[in-house]
Amino acid sequence: MSNLVAIKRALLSVSDKEGIVALAQKLHAHGCEIISTGGTQRKLEEAGIPTTEISTVTGNPEAFGGRMKTISFNIESALLFDREKDKAEAEALNIQPIDLVVCNLYPFQKVLEQGANFDTLIENIDIGGPTMIRAAAKNFAYVATVVQPSDYSELMTQLDENKGALDYGFRKNLMCKAFNHTADYDALIATTMDKENGVHSFRMGFDAGKTLRYGENSHQAATLYREKGVAKSGYDLNILHGKALSFNNILDINGAIEAVKEATQSAVSVVKHSNPCGLAEGTNQRTLLELAWAGDPISAFGSIVAFNRPLKLETVQFFELDNADKSKRKFVEVVIAPAIDADALAYLQQHKNLRIIEFDAASVGHNQDVRYMNGALLVQDADAKLHDKLELVTAAKVNLDEEKSLIEFGLKSIKTIKSNSISIVRFKDGNAQLLGMGAGQPNRLIATKLAIEKCRENLANEFSGDNFEGYVKEEFGKAWLISDAFFPFADNVELAAAAGVGKIVQPGGSIRDKSVIEACDKAGMAMVFTGVRHFKH
C-alpha cells in the first residue's frame, strides 16, 4: 500500500448535485474514467463530460423504478478487493478497480422535514448508496469516498498537487466522514420508522470531541462534544484570551448564557455554580453590571459574567483590574459577550488567566432538554413558556400593565435558578434587578428565608441614612417575590408578609390555594397566578 493512490476510475452518484460538475471536470482533466447513474449522468453529459453508464459495469439494467441500480457483484468487488492480496483473483474475475466513490444519499431528512407521507419516506431510503459508501470506506487504503460537497475543494486541490492521486491521510479522514454519514442517515431512518410504528426511540450524534482540563473535580477526565447538525451551539465559544475551560466553567457559562438570552433589553448575569446570583436588565450596560454584581458581591468572586450586548470599555472598568490596590480588583473566571470592543478586550487582557469569550446568547436555542442518567436517558421539551396567564387572585389590586415587565423579568430569572427557588426582583432607577434569591433548597420555606436575607443584606450595602427598616419596607413593598412552583402552605406568605414583601407571583395549582390567597388578603398582599411552573432540577 502506497501513500498516494491514483484516481483512474470514479463512480459519481449524487442526490445533492452542488459542485458535482466542477469536480467531474477536474477528474476528467486528470484522465479519470467517470462511471455515473441516472440524474447525475445526465447532468454531467449536459456539461459535456463523458461518462460510462453504470449498467456496462454491473452487467445489468437499472430496474424496479431505480430501486436496483448500483448494487452488484461487480461494483462492490471493484470497491472492496485488496489491491495487493486480491489482485490476481480480481483479474481472473475481470474486476476493474474503482478508486473513488462520490455519493450522497437520497434526501430522507429533507422529505421528512417537508412532511412527506409514509410511502414517500420509504422511497427515499437509499440502499445502494450506503452499500457503496461503506464498501469504499472499508477499503480506504486503496479507495476514497466523498459524501459531502464541502470536501470537493480539497479533493480537487489534492488531484492537482499529486498529479491525479490522493494521499493516505485525506482518504482516512474521508473514511471517518463516510461511516459517520451512513450512521447518522440510518439513525434518522430508524427513529422515524419507530415513530411511524408507535415506538419511542431516541438517537443523537456528536463529534469534534475535545479534552477539557478536567471534570467537575481534578481527578475526573472530561470531554466536550458538538452536536451534529446544529447551526450554533455551546461548543462554539470563541475564546479570545485566558486559560483553557474546565467542565465546571462550561456548565456555568451555559447558565450565564441562559440567564440573558431571552432578555429584550441589555442584560447582565453573574453566575456561580450554575445559578445567577446577580441579574439585571435595562439600558445602561455599566449600570446593569453594577446592579447584577450587587445581587451577591461575595458570591460574585470567581463568577461567570455574561452580557447580551457588545461589551464596552466603560463597563469592564468596573472590575478595576488596573487598581494599584489589588484588594479592590474584582476576580471573575469568565467574561462572555456577543462582541467585545477592542479597548475593552485590551483592558480585560490585563488579567492573564481571565477567559474572555465572544458568544451571542441569542444565537442558540434548543427544543429539548436531554439528560443522561445511569444507563437511561431523560428527554423533555425545553422550558420555553413564561406564563399562561397573569391572574390577580387577591383583594389587593395592582396595575398588571405597569408591572408586567418586572414580573416577566422575575419569571425569566426563576427559570434559570435551581429549585426549590425564590427570587425577589425590583426596579432600581428604571432597571430590573434580581435583588436576592434562594436556590436549590429541598424546603421552599428555606428558599424564601434565604432570598429575604440576601435582599436585606444587599439593601444594607446600598443604604445610607437613619431608618434602615423603613427603607427595607419601602423597597420590599415595590418588589415582587417570584416562586418557581406553588406554595403548598401559607407559611411562605406569612414569612414574606413579616419581611414587608407586598406582591407575590406563583403558578398556583395547590389544593391549598384558597388558604394561601386568604393569607395574602389578611396581610394586604397582592398575588398573581401564572399557571406555569418553572422547576429546574
Image (cartoon, grey):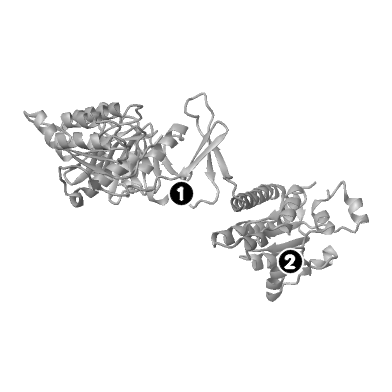
- Identify the residue at the far top of this view: 219
Classify 10 Å Cα crowding around label 2: few (below 14), some (14-19), many (20 and above).
few
What residue lies at 19% left-to-right and 29% top-to-bottom? 456
Q: Which residue is mark 1?
A: 367
Q: Which residue is mark 2?
A: 66
The picture quadrant where one finds residue 20 is bottom right
- Apparent side of residue 146 relative to residue 464 in the rendered image (left or right): right
Of the pair 34 and 207, the residue shown nearer to us: 207
Mark carried by residue 407: none
Amino acid bearing label 1: Asn
Mark nearer the N terminus (1 vs 2): 2
Distance, label 1 to label 2, CA atoms, is 37 Å
Residue 137: where, in percent of width, then height? 73, 50
Q: Secondary structure at mark 1?
A: loop
Classify 10 Å Cα crowding around label 1: few (below 14), some (14-19), many (20 and above).
few
Of the pair 367 and 525, the residue shown nearer to us: 525
Residue 229 appears anywhere in the view: yes
Residue 45: where, in percent of width, then height? 71, 74
